[in-house]
Structures are given as structure tokens and as C-alpha cells.
Image (cartoon, helix red, strand yellow):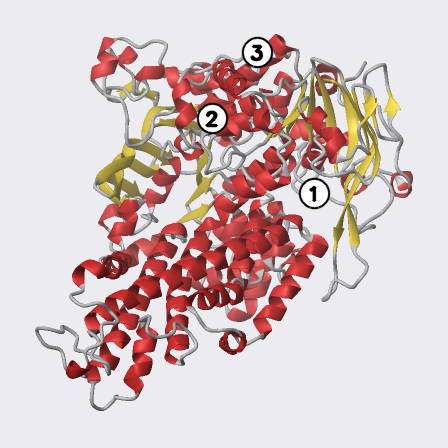
Amino acid sequence: MTKKLLDIKNLRTCFYEDDKVIAAVDDVSLFVNKNSVVGLVGESGCGKTMTALSVTQLLPRLNCKITSGMIRFNDQDLLDLDKGQLRSIRGKEISYIFQEPSTCLNPVLTVEEQMQEVVSLHRQEISREDHREFIIKQLKDAGINMPGDKVGAFPHQLSGGEKQRVMIAMAMIPRPKLLIADEPTTALDVTIQAQILRLLQDLKNKYGMAILLISHDFNIVGQLADYIAVMYAGQIVEFSSMNSLMNHPNHPYTKGLLDCLPDKDISSGGKLNVIEGEVPRADSYPCGCRFHPRCPYVFDRCKKEMPPIFCLDDTTPEVRCWLYSNSKT
Amino acid sequence: MIKIFLKNKLAFSGLIIIILISLFAVLAPVISHYAPDEIDIGNYLCPPSYEHWLGTDLLGRDLFSRMAYGARISLCVGFISVSIVVIIGLFFGSLAGYYGGKLDTLIMRFVDIMLCFPRFILILSIIAMLEPSIFIVMAVIGLTSWMGISRLVRAEILSLKERDFVQAARACGVGDVKIILQHLVPNAMGPVIVSATLGVAAAILLESSLSFLGLGVQPPTPSWGNILMDAKSCLGIAWWMSVFPGVAIFITVIGYNLLGEGLRDLFLPKK
Amino acid sequence: MALLELKDITKFYDVEKGIFSLHCSQKIRAVEAVNLSLAPAKTMGLVGESGCGKSTLAKLIVKLIAPASGDIFFENKNITQLREKEFRPLRKKIQIVFQDPYSSLSPRLKIKNIIAEPLQAFKTEKKKIESRIRELMEQVGLDKMYLARFPHQLSGGQRQRVGIARALATSAKLIVLDEAVSSLDLSTQAQVLNLLINLQKKYKLTYLFIAHNLRVVRFISDNVAIMYRGSIVEKGPTEIVYKKPLHPYTKKLLASQPSWSKRNLSQNHMPYFNKSRTDISGDFSGCQFYQHCPKAKQRCRDSKPAFKQVNTEHGVSCFYID
């Protein structure tokens, strides 16, 4: 039985705005096994970033809270820990990389100074004199050309791809067990994107690391992931292995999204299958299944009751859809 | 948006103060028992009493009425001079920001030159050359205070004109003037409104200072500043003549400043 | 007969160096010697990565900026030197839709005023404007109730539809779509792409579709041009270029596309990082892809390859093609 490194169950994270309570993450359950990659796919506003931030409670303090659920990391309940204990896990065992490397790097510090901060915090066994050498090696591992020169550079002197590599190098310093990558390639050019994905895969293999890869692009996620979770309107609607999801998507939303991909070998002039309608706003979700107004397979029960997650078999495929109500929950 | 504004307690108090002062000014004929220039030598320099709520001045004129009519002057000067400031500032700022190049350099160097003059001395000099009156005061304050807003407007327009919706309007064939008036200026108004609100406070203070020196509103028209001028000669004996106008100016300026700060939070919210 | 033709279009941007900007400025080649021909009622895709000059080219075509040299022909007429006054009537026929649905609509105008703007600029009668606006809303699939709303009350997809309606208002013949679907979600993107195709069929529109997403370009374009650092390196019918790319950069681009179906194949063909040649730095006069090209030789560094027609429609700018 493969051990679950990260196990999220029924997570609910809410925003409090004026007098409204908006559940950005609603009853989300997923898991990431050791040394595996799980992709989290969904359109903008579906809650993927909030889910990622909830793992180590990196939420905006004033109006956002995890209201219920369980997050277990390496057999530890993360929601039970106090701030100090959580901080020792965040950054050390769970690392993050984000979409926009320019905003994540301090513009007035050189690469070396920023990375040194992480080294002093999480790799205290390395002596001060050896810091520079260690940092240069990390940059080289992340694929930066001439790391000896780049180490003294400021962020504005680096290209987009180089900045993202610096972020990855920083994230890898403490040798985390889990890397949460939130749209790491969206802001990059296609050719650089391919290199970064390859880099992530190699690092994963080299260090036995697990990755939670968040993206809106099935193809990016599909290139690395072993499992894919699809989110819609704050909920997970499907969670299954990569091959099974891409070849036999179960949830109508997943099917619709995959049909939208201008991927097929059709000559231009053909049409894409679309999902009619729009994603509902967070403060006005429809009753029952949130996807029902746009679903081509809708029937009465969908409009009234929210479907629970059904397991299609003992291995993973999980679907939140009344079409599968014969399976067990 | 209004809800956010109401939540900001300071800004809300600022607004209340301004509303109260404005009511005070507008209702001046209704709430005053005496005319502001009704002389009653027999009752000169009376302390606050039941007949004269704020006392009387050197010529026995009721201070309360004079304060109420003075409020009209202060607010009038405030609004009109700031309107002049905003119009001139928008004009120069939009031209400089939109067209750039030599026109921009020309206008901005002109602004720099204007800023070299110490404002108050400049105003004093101009008024001293002309006959002081309320209109001259409004015009001069307006003509010497537009530089800050023009820079603000120029900065906003410089960044706005590269935005897609402006490029789209140009691609649609919309003329320059229409683009400036319909697209750029309305979107640049945020900082301008904040600056203008704070500018009203500054204008009121300026007018009071000028009237205090005798170069602003001329007697017998009452203004908080020239009431203070009269108070100068009886500082020790008639405290009510300096305290009430002083406090009124103080409260009005604070009111406008609080409102301005509140509007700033509204237009430039932290996310 | 081509609807739009670009001949040797070049655009430089000056970058000033030195404290008081007194130094001689450095020129950045945004677009260099671009030749492009748009056939009527067809879509030309323009693909490239950031900084390749595609947006600059879009602005040159709509005459938001002027080229340093070269000519632009629209309906066989040279429009390059036309002053704004003379060019204005032609603005009706050439329109642009921008990438960002959030910043391409004026935040303080209602939707109906945004769509009316081009009509008002060309002095259309008020009554005709009203009916035309309703017609346009119907064509782009937006309900009339959105006319009274402001842009921030609409979703990204709806805003982009408004942008398209505005571009169609004056019955344009050529529409430049500058990354028009790049900021949209997958499902919205599909809806907007279908809308664009329908409109093209109905009104025989010509599109210049600029994007960095190769799949979307392949889907919608009849012909495609690949841009790299200001120059067009390859162009031809979409299927031919995609199936048999000739230029090393095109091959690299196509190979870099992430694909879930590629995951089981060996990915060792993707270089780990840009192995760039270090014998050159800064500006040089040869082929701009020299530093990253696996096939480059001395000749590539010293001189720029001319654009060669490999067959009637497919052309490439490279000395060493298979």
C-alpha cells in the first residue's frame, strides 16, 4: 500500500467579506503519494491556488480561514500544529514555487543574498564559508548557465526562465518532500516551459520528491502527473490516474474541458465543442450540483441535491456526479 | 463603494463636519438673529450671552451672524479656487501627458518655474498690486496652486495612455480631444479628487491668512480671517473674537483633510 | 490579390543609456525586414515567443505606430505614408482586438458607449447607431441587458466579446487579433474561437491571429508565420508548416509543446537548458537564431539568410534546411 505523503480530506476554506461567507475551497479531498506527481487542474477562480495555500495555511490573515477538514502530512495533522511547528514544516518539508517569479524575488537583493536566507534557515549544517559554493551548485542543478556569474545578479538582470530556475533552486535547498508548484510555467515562453517541466521531473526523480502541480493546462499537467484532480467552483469533481482521466474522463465537466482543447488533428474551419454558459460566481452558486446549468447530461436530481464523491473502483477514480450514483461513496 | 467609505470612521467624521459647516453657511440668514453688519456700539465687545451666542465685536456686531456669513465666504473661496486649480491643472497636465515630447517639456518647465516662487509671497505681491477683493483672492489662489495637480494628472495620463482601451479608441478612429476628455480624464480623476479635497482646506487657510493681513476679503464683508484681524487689537480683553474663528478654521480644515484621506483610501485601496 | 501586404517593414525602438540620456542610444530591432501577405477571407496565424515583435507588428498594421522603413499596402494602396487624416476612413476597415479583456475596455464607460464609439467617430446617425449596436450584440452572442453595464460587471469572456463587437462595428474587413484568446479560460476560449470562425464565414473577414499557443493557432489559421526576434523565419500553410517544419526554431517550438500523450516517450531530445553559443554577445548582423541553433555555422553568424520559397507557398529563412 503506497504511503500517502499528503492527505487532504474534506477541506473547507472560507472567505469572510462584509457579511458574506464564501467557500473558496469546499469539501476538497485529494492525496499525494511519496515520489509521485499529482496535477490539480481547473479554470480561474475554481479554488486551486487556495487549496495549495491552505496546506500550510499561507492564507491572507484577515478574512480567510480553514473552517473544517483534515490535512495530514507524513502522518502529522497540519491543522493541529502551532505556528512554530507549522513554520518548521513550511519551507523545509513542503516548498512552494509560484507563477510569477518576478514578484517572488526581492528586487533589491542579489540571488546569493536571497538564497543565503533559505540556507541559513533550513540547512544549518552547512557552514557560512561553504554557503556560496552550495548556492552555486544549487543554481547549476537548476540548469542555470554560468551560475558563478549569475549568483551576484539582481532579479531584473535575469530572464523569466532564469528567475523561475532561481525560485526552483531556492525551493530545493531544504530538500523538501513535497513541492507545491502553482502554475510555474504559465508566465514563461513555450520553449522555456518545456525545459522547466523537464527540470521538475528530473529533480523529482533525483530527490524522490512529490509534486503537487497546479495548472489550467491539461497538457502541462499531463506531461508530469501520475494523478489528476479536476476542480470546478471550489470542489473536486474528478480525481483519477492520468491515463484513465485523459482516455476515459468520467465527469461531464472533464469531458467538456478535454473536448475544448484545440488539440485534435482537425483542419482549420472545424468547430470546437464548447461547454455552454459560464463559471458561476463564488457568491451565487446554483443549488444542487454546481455544474448542472451547463451539463449536457443533467437530470432532475442534479438540480436539487449536491452529489457526493463516488468511487468507481477500489483504485482511485473518484467522481462527483449523480450519473455514477450506483457506485459506493 | 459607499459602504467602504462609511466604514472608514475618520473619513465619515470628516464628511459630517463638512456637512455641518456647510449647513451653517447655507442657513446663515435663517439662523442668525442679527444682520452681520448691524452695528450696535452700545453693546460692543460683549462676551457670549443669551442675546449674542458668540459675543459681539468692536462695533457691537453679532459674532455668530458674522461667523455664519463668514463660513459662506470660506467655503465659496475654497470651492471656486479649487475649481480653477482643477481646470487649469487638468488642462496642462493632459496636454503634457498625452502629447509628450516638446510640449511636455515646455509645460513641465513652466510648472517648475511657477513652483520656484514662494506661493504665499507671490499671492501677496499680486494682490498688493491689485485691489484686494474676494474675487481677486479666489482667482489668485487658483492661478498659483494648479501646479501640483497638473503633475498628478500628467503622471496618471502617461500611464493610462498606454493602456489597451486607449489604443483601441485610437484604432477606432476617435480623435485626440475625445480620447482625452472621455477616456483619460475620467480615469485620472481619482488622485485629482483627493488632491482637490485637501486643496480646499489649503485654500480656506490661505484666504483666512490673507484676510487676517487685510489683503483678502475687505470689511464690512465678514470672513473668518478678517474677524481674526479685528481680534488682534483686543486679544487680551475679548477672547471670543479670536477663539471662535480660530476654532472654526481649525475644524473645517481638519474636516476636509479627513475627507481627503478617506477618499484616498477609497480610490487607492490596499488589496 | 492580397488584402494586406507588408514589404520589408522595420521598426526600431530607441533605448537611451547614460545618466542624462545624452549618450548615443541603443537601437532595439523590434521588427526587421518583415514581409507578409494576408489573403482575403483567410486567417494568418503569427506565432512567436515574448519579445519576438508580434505585438509591434500588430500596432504597425493598425497604424498605432509608424515603421522606420518599409511599406504597407492595403487593398493595393500604399498606406504607409498616409497622414492620420487621410488614413482615417480606412480605419473603418482595419480593426484590432486586444489580449487583455480587463484593460481593453474603458472602465468608466457603459458597454453601449464602448461599442458606439467607433460608430460615433465616423459620424453615423444616432438611430442607426442604436440598431447597429443591437445587431452587433446579437452577432457576438451577448444579451442586450449587458449594454447598460460597466466592464467590471462582465466576465472575461463577455468582455472579449464586447471587444469583438467593437471591432466589427464599422464592418471591418481585416481584424488583427493580438493574443485575443490568450487570457481566457479553456472553456471560454473555445466559445470565443467558435464565434470568430462563425463571424469569418459569415462576413468573409480576414484575420491576423497573433498568439503563442501553437495549438490554438493551428486550429484557427489557414496560413502561419513564425517570428523570432523581429524576423519571420518560416511561413506557409498551417498544416504543412506544422507537419514538416523546416526552420530549426520552428522545430524547437513544435517539439517544446507540452503534451500528455508525449509523456511516455523519451524526453531526452529536449535540451536541459539553452545551450547557447558563447562566441558572440550583444548585437550582430547574422541570423538571430545563431546562438541557440544546433545547426549553425560561421556563415550564419556573419550574414542573414534570405527568405527562400521552398515551394509555392512554404518559405523559410535559413541557410541549412533539410
Residue A328: image quadrant is top left
User: Residue at coordinates 18% horizontally, 64% vertically from top-left?
Assistant: B32
In the image: residue C30, left or right of residue B160: right
Amino acid carrying label 3: it is Asn
Along the line of sight, the residue nearer the viewer: C56 or C82: C82
Image quadrant occupied by the N terminus of chain B: top left
Q: Which mark is residue C274?
A: 1
**Inter-mark Cα distance, 1 to 2:** 49 Å
In this orientation, which residue lies closer to the viewer: A31 or A11?
A: A11
Q: Chain of mark 3?
A: C
Crowding around mark 1 (Cα neighbors within 10 Å: few <14, some 14 to 19, many 20+) is some
Q: Is residue A250 visible?
A: no
Q: Alpha carbon of mark 3 to alpha carbon of mark 1: how far?
A: 41 Å
Secondary structure under tag 3 reads: helix
**What residue did someone put label 2 on?**
C112
Query: Could you confirm whether marks 2 and 3 are on the same chain?
Result: yes
Q: Circle 3 is placed at which residue position?
A: C198
Residue at (42, 29) in percent of width and height: C155
Q: Chain of mark 2?
A: C
Give the amino acid at mark 2: Lys
Nearest to N terminus: mark 2 or mark 3? 2
Give residue B4's position: percent from left, percent from top: 29, 48
Can marks 3 and 1 be said to lie on one chain?
A: yes
